Image: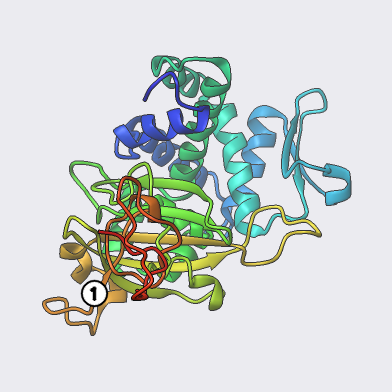
Amino acid sequence: ASPADSPSEWVREYIQARHNHVPELDTLGEALHEALKAEASSPDESFEALARARLFARHGLTVRTLPAEVMVEWTRRFDPHRGRLLLSDTLGPSSRAFAVACQLALMEHGAELQALTEAASAPDDPTRNLLKTSLTNSLAAAILMPYAAFQRTAEETGYDLARLQARFGVGFEQAAHRLTTLSRPTARGVPFFLMRVDQAGNVSKRYASGAFPFSRFGGSCPRWRLHSAFRTPGRIVTQIIETPDGSRWFTLARTVDRQGQDAFTEGQDLAIGLGCELKHAHRLIYARGLDLQKPEVTPIGPACRLCERHPCAERAAPPVGRALTVDDWSKSVSPYPFA
């Protein structure tokens, strides 16, 4: 990562350089998950109930859910003076559990999170704070979805996201993001990449545990069904794509709700794209019944200005550095034909 990057770019590059895998946090998360299970008075007790009990017993913190009108812009807020963790009532069950896990991570392993943050040598305070938040989120995910159990369940179910959600009490995006972190040398998962976009095509998440076709730029090709997932809210759509270098990828996409909606936010207004190299697709339940030897493949590109595929009826802009060949005698299927 370059010091010239914005804080979000710097953090993303730093995490991606480690293939979105921080082994220290996975170890801490597994240990804390087991400790919570050992403290359970009933095998059916939910994670959130256990975490709330531990926050109160060990740290004197209570958890309260308040109306969005009281929380205003915050979905989670810690009040150290009164010893309270305040949550907005706009959060669903899995998001509330994740918020409680984040607070538990900070209370139990704040020193380790701070040490990892300092070791990264971020260029300024905003970047350092954003990195610590990202690491805290990673530890919260590791507490909710301990590595060994999550990776084993993923393999046994063919990476069935619905089963993973039910087994660990998490949301679709939480489970999908966790799949991109399974890089433990002794128990590797399928090396997934993940992208999250809104209906305007803005990318707000971009992570991978292995090769990544859109490592820094791109991923906005209208031919990729990630961007058409909004037409079928809540349903998983699959597609095999081919990038300009000839690489082939199995992908799936689904819409999710934005966390902490307000009166101006539509439901299902984010889409999650999850994918892996085609050679791994046979391990996924979503690829069953497909001819993976002779698949139906959709050629896609990065952003239109970086894409040199021609002709393309869905091109929205001419490629940088290529001369247009518009004339009076013909009309191409592409609005921007080029040599």
Q: Could you say where residue 100 lies in the image, as x and y percent from the top left?
A: 63, 43
60 vs 149, nearest the viewer: 149
Q: Could you say where residue 313 lies in the image, as x and y percent from the top left?
A: 38, 73
Identify the secondary structure beneath mark 1. Answer: loop
**Of all residues shown, which one is farthest toward the front?**
328
**Of all residues shown, which one is farthest toward the left?**
293
- Asked if one can make out residue 193 in the rendered structure from this viewpoint, the answer is yes
Rendered residue at 50%/57% (across/down): 173
- Asked if residue 279 lies left or right of residue 37, the reply is left
Q: Could you say where residue 309 lies in the image, as x and y percent from the top left?
A: 27, 62
316 vs 196, nearest the viewer: 316
318 above or below 181? below
Q: Please state which amino acid type lies under the numbered disc 1.
A: Val
Residue 316 quadrant: bottom left
Rendered residue at 77%/49% (across/down): 88
Q: Could you say where residue 109 lies in the image, as x and y percent from the top left?
A: 51, 26
- Asked if one can make out residue 51 in the rendered structure from this viewpoint, the answer is no
Which quadrant, please, contains the N terminus? top left
Residue 64 quadrant: top right
Q: How many marks?
A: 1
**Of all residues shown, which one is farthest toward the right?**
69
Rendered residue at 25%/80% (across/down): 288
265 above or below 77? below
Q: Which residue is mark 1?
A: 297
- Number of other residues with Cα within 10 Å of mark 1, as a class: few under 14, some 14 to 19, many 20 or more: few
99 vs 127, nearest the viewer: 127
303 above or below 279? above
Residue 325 quadrant: bottom left
Colour scheme of the rendered structure: rainbow
- Asked if residue 147 lies left or right of residue 166, the reply is left
Which quadrant, please, contains the C terminus? bottom left
